[in-house]
Image (cartoon, rainbow, N blue to C red):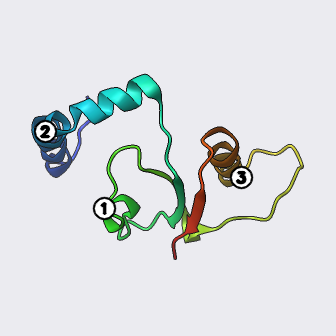
């Protein structure tokens, strides 16, 4: 395993020993049935913002896209790879999200 900062390893251990066991049923359900979030959040990749924490959301409740400046580019059917456009299309067409929130 590559060298990770100790606080990340401790955080992982805490998750595996605390939150994961407490929510293991939810994680199993998500693995078995798939995700069905009602809301997509487009947020900045700034490390000071954490949509799941800000909205007090649990696993599977939000579909979160983070990029520089929480930008949503205009539609461009040029065949090029656009990760933001692809995520939006997946959220709307496949996940059938009901809400899209641009956080910023």
Looking at the image, is mark 1 or mark 3 earlier in the sequence? 1
Gap in angstroms between the C-alphas marked 3 and 2: 35 Å
Residue 10 placed where, x, y %? 12, 45
Q: Secondary structure at mark 1?
A: loop
Tag in front: 2 or 1: 1
Q: Which mark is residue 5?
A: none
Q: Residue at x 40, y 63 (%)?
A: 51
Tag in front: 1 or 3: 1
Q: Which mark is residue 13?
A: 2
Residue 68 placed where, x, y %? 56, 66
Looking at the image, is mark 2 or mark 1 earlier in the sequence? 2
Quick one: which residue is furthest to the top in this view?
A: 32
Q: Residue at x 51, y 71 (%)?
A: 103
17 left or right of 74? left
Q: Secondary structure at mark 2?
A: helix
Residue that mark 3 sits on = 85
Quick one: which residue is furthest to the bottom in this view?
A: 104
Query: Mark 2 packing: few (<14 Cα in 10 Å), some, or many (20+)?
Result: few
Gap in angstroms between the C-alphas marked 2 and 1: 21 Å
Q: Are marks 2 and 1 in contact (CB under 8 Å)?
A: no
Residue that mark 1 sits on = 56
Q: Residue at x 41, y 23 (%)?
A: 32
Quick one: which residue is furthest to the right in this view?
A: 78
């Amino acid at each position: 395993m590559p060298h990770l900062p100790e606080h990340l390893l401790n955080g992982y251990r805490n998750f595996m020993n605390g939150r994961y066991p407490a929510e293991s049923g939810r994680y199993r359900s998500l693995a078995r049935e798939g995700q069905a979030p009602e809301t997509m959040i487009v947020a900045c990749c700034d490390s000071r913002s954490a949509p799941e924490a800000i909205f007090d959301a649990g696993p599977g409740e939000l579909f979160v896209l983070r990029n520089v400046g929480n930008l949503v580019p205009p539609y461009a059917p040029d065949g090029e790879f656009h990760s933001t456009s692809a995520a939006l299309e997946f959220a709307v067409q496949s996940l059938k999200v009901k809400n899209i929130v641009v956080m910023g």
